[in-house]
Amino acid sequence: MARGRIRTALGTGTLAVLVGWAALAAPQATPVVERVTLSPAELREAATGALKAGHPEIAYRYSDALVKRDATDRTALLIRARAARDLGQYDNAKQSAKAAWKQAETPEDKFSTSMIMAQTLSSAGQRTMAQLWLRRAAQHAPTEALENRAIRDFRYVRSRNPWNTQFSFAITPDSNVNNGTSEKYLSDDPDDFIGSQTEFSANSRPIPGMEIALGASTRYRFRETETHANDLTFSTRFQHYVISSSDKRRLRTVEGNDYDFGYYEFGYAHRGKNREGRGEYRLFTTVGQNWYGGEEYSRYVDLAGGQTFYLENYRSIRVNLSARRTFGVTRSDLDEVNASVSYRFPIGTSGILSTSLNASIGESPNNAGDSYEAIGARAWYRLTKPVLGARASFSVSARSKVHDDYVHGVLIRQVGREDMQYTADFLLVFDQIDYYGFNPTMRVSASRTDSNVTRLQAERFGINFGIQSAF
């Protein structure tokens, strides 16, 4: 036998192909068997041909023999994985794909192996894991066309996946983690002699620090038709604050975790198409709980609904109505209703503009000072052209809030409370920097609150560094 070629009977665990046929003239004649000797390369080609011809059982038998000959034969491992997947042997397929991944060295190898693993996981119903491997395929794709193919497959698998899970992470240097007052004295009213001469404590003034935020949300779509979808939802977020050692020494009794905030919530959502496909409505209900400074703060129940009207030329109008009942633990109870309307439309070819108006009212059954009326406006604009090589958007907003029965001051006087808050936000998404389908982001935010209650007047500035999914 020549070097590199093996000639033995199939079934002994070695490489061979038996070609047999029955004599046409005698139906009961004994089949004639011819021994054909192939090299490993020729057997790989035969296995590939069998796979393309729709004979996965033959491809599996040939590739399995190749793997038994050489457990590091990456091509044979991939053929066996694909054949096992087509035969419904998903455990064998995943095992072969994992072994092939260990042998992958070039971007081409890693891309093809990731795609085979993703296809196997998707066929096995493990679509979330399939999405992770498609992100890996996109990361290692040797060409833009192959990267686009991985992204296309990712979106398809995501659309078929009843689970949709997202994570968020951000670090934000913040000039005012405690939302401290920007004023020096308790009162700017000259008639309030004591308040106008008394300085706020250091703990009430702005404390700079660092916010570290981690969040997660998931949705399980338990029923879906062409026009309707029903989801169970869960989301959680935790914000931890760190202040400098010098501020800890200066403030003495203050720690960053005094301002920590977190929540979790469960919900149900129903969506449906209407207006002959030119509209969509949404209904939500949510129950949740939150904490502040490590202690339970409140529990709440939300009910919400909305309607989107899709117009010509990429324009749309959205109307929302929501209600919340807050059951206070370390705060008062509060009933709130909010209504909003927004209009989104393109500005030529330069970008997209979205404007919105909202109004809300709150009534507290056990603390009249927490009852309020508010109205606000917001504008958001996304630029078409990149800024500093990144996708850019910015927004501005203003909100007026009035508490008729608010009580404040050193000399207790019921004069009400009027707040006016302004915010500005600028976001850059660096989509030219891509790691496993995630892009870094930078958000610059600033806010100012003017109030007739001096301790509520505040200014805040922060730069947020985070990540978001590219697809």
Image (cartoon, helix red, strand yellow):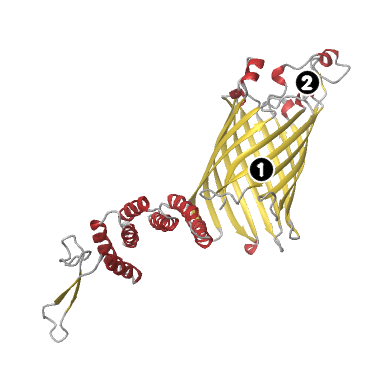
Find the residue positioned furthest to the front. 3
Q: Nearer the viewer, residue 268 or 134?
A: 134
Q: Is residue 115 left or right of residue 89?
A: right
> So how many labels did they put on this image?
2
Q: Position of residue 327 (x, y in %)?
A: 61, 30
454, above or below 93, in the image:
above
Q: Image height check: is 297 above or below 16?
A: above
For the point 34% across and 72% down, the residue is 53
Mark 2 surroundings within 10 Å by alpha-carbon count, few (fewer than 14), some (14 through 19), many (20 or more): some
| Number of the label disc, if any, that sits on residue 5 | none
Q: Amino acid at mark 1?
A: Ser
**Image position, residue 459 (x, y; %):** 75, 30
Q: Earlier in the sequence, mark 2 or mark 1?
A: 1
What residue appears at the point 66 percent right and 46 percent down from the top-left corner? 428
The answer to whether residue 172 is seen in the rendering is: yes
Q: Which residue is mark 2?
A: 408
Can you tell which quarter of the image residue 360 is in? top right
Q: Position of residue 59 (x, y in %)?
A: 29, 65
Q: Dot 1 lies on which element?
A: strand
Give the foreground label among 2 and 1: 2
Nearer to me, 325 or 344: 344
Name the residue type under label 2.
Answer: His
**Looking at the rendered structure, which numbered label has been put on residue 322?**
1
For the question of whether residue 418 can be seen, the reply is: no
Q: Nearer the viewer, residue 331 or 54?
A: 54
Q: Is residue 236 left or right of residue 356?
A: left
Rendering coords of residue 306 (x, y %): 65, 50
Disc 2 is placed on an element classified as strand
How crowded is the residue under tag 1: few (<14 C-alpha within 10 Å), some, or many (20+)?
Answer: some
